[in-house]
Image (tube, grey):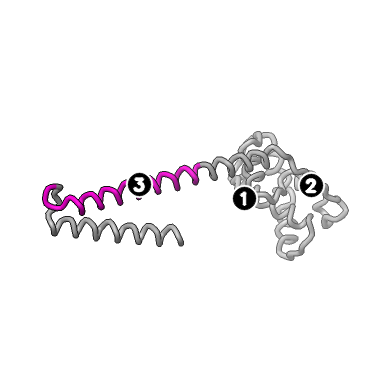
């Protein structure tokens, strides 16, 4: 919101300066002070904007480095197969891999996964799809529920339901 206000104010300022300059015939010889003030103001504005851009680039690089550090760490869930409902205990191992909550880690997992892993996910989900959907209709706060929900989301996000042949 602050950026929009700054852009709006600076746009109004520069448009009004242009209109004033046009009215008094924007020529150096006739109005040297006005032309000097306008050019100086424009240069200051450009330098200020450039400094803002360099700060934003540094912040972006810092965030990128932090995200890279996050991606280097592997978070492995430790789920208890006994905590899963009947018929879904076999999904424990696959939910440990695909049930990642962090969106950066999940996207990284999506990008780096091999076809064999994707087929394994597809086969496991489709073998129990009805049970999973029924289980997910009754939300709870358990880590197993969240993990299974994210695993099912990965199946949908990756469009594995459209795959037909190995």
**Which residue in the protein does label 3 denote?**
46
Residue 18 quadrant: bottom left
Q: Residue furthest front?
A: 33
**Which residue in the protein does label 2 denote?**
77
- Residue 39 vertical position relative to residue 4 in the rendered view, above or below: above
Nearer to the camera, 89 or 50: 50
Chief secondary structure of the magenta portion: helix
Q: Residue at x 65, y 45 (%)?
A: 106
Tag 1–tag 3 contact (CB < 8 Å): no
Observer-side mark, 1 or 2, equals 2
Nearer to the camera, 17 or 12: 17
What is the spatial separation of the Cα atoms under label 1 and label 2, in whole angstroms? 21 Å
**70 relative to 92 in the view: left or right:** left
Instruction: Estimate the x, y position of residue 33 in percent, counting from the top left.
Output: 20, 52
Observer-side mark, 1 or 3, equals 3
Nearer to the camera, 156 or 40: 40
Magenta region, residue range: 29-57
């Amino acid at each position: 919101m602050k950026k929009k206000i700054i852009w709006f104010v600076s746009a109004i300022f520069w448009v009004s300066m242009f209109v004033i300059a046009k009215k008094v015939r924007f020529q150096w010889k006739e109005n040297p002070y006005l032309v000097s003030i306008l050019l100086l103001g424009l240069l200051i504005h450009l330098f200020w904007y450039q400094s803002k851009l360099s700060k934003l680039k540094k912040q972006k690089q810092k965030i990128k480095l932090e995200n890279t550090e996050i991606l280097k760490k592997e978070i492995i869930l430790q789920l208890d197969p006994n905590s899963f409902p009947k018929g879904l205990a076999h999904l424990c191992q696959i939910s440990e891999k695909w049930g990642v909550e962090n969106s950066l880690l999940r996207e990284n997992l999506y990008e780096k996964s091999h076809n064999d892993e994707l087929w394994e996910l597809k086969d496991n989900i489709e073998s129990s799809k009805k049970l999973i959907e029924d289980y997910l209709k009754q939300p709870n706060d358990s880590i197993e529920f969240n993990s299974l929900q994210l695993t099912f989301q990965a199946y949908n996000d990756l469009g594995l339901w459209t795959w037909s042949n190995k």
